[in-house]
Image (cartoon, rainbow, N blue to C red):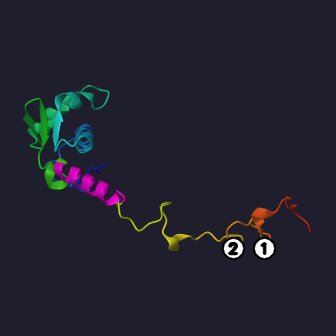
Amino acid sequence: MPYARIDDRWDEHPKFVDLDLAAFGLMACAIVYSNRQLTDGFIPDKAVRSFGACGKGPKIAERLVAAGIWIRVDAGYEIVGFLDHNFSRAEVEAKRASDRNRKRPAKDSARNPDGRGDESDRIPRPYPPPPPNQDPKPTAATPFQDSQPRARGGS
């Protein structure tokens, strides 16, 4: 999932100086929505109406249009400069495909069937493996082989 990118000084930009907290909140919701839905900065009217519980999204959106931060388009709004700071749908999908291919196991893998290489066996064995057709017999007691619990405290 892509992360939304918001400049840590966006509130100081001349376009945003005169906006109130509600407009900043709507802008943040819209950026996150567009990243999550991969809309490349398009925010449908239905989404604007659903942001927050106050129902004032469309009025606040018109203030963002008046400030030149959003553009009114058919059935919604477009965030001006969204793709200057965020990944496009095509970029996100290409990255996801690349990650899937990188994580997919190779058919001719040199790994063992259990998924570990021979050199990655880091757990020490309590005794050497038994020769074929013989029962394993521990050579030394290990903490895992104690049959009686140890008493706590004194000796």
Quarter holding residue 125:
bottom right
**Which residue is label 1 attached to?**
139
Callout 2 environment at 10 Å: few (<14), some (14 to 19), or many (20+)?
few
Asked whether residue 82 is drawn in magenta, I would say: no
In percent of width and height, residue 47 lies at 23, 31
Q: Marks 1 and 2, how far apart in space?
A: 8 Å
- Does residue 51 lie above or below 116 as drawn? above
In percent of width and height, residue 17 lies at 18, 48
Helix, strand or loop at label 1? It is loop
Q: Which stretch is magenta?
A: 90-105
Looking at the picture, tell me which residue is in the foreground, 108 or 19.
108
Callout 1 environment at 10 Å: few (<14), some (14 to 19), or many (20+)?
few
Q: What residue lies at 49% left-to-right and 65% top-to-bottom?
A: 116
Asked whether residue 103 is drawn in magenta, I would say: yes
Residue type at tag 1: Thr
Q: What residue lies at 21% left-to-right and 53% top-to-bottom?
A: 94
Q: Quadrant of the C terminus?
A: bottom right
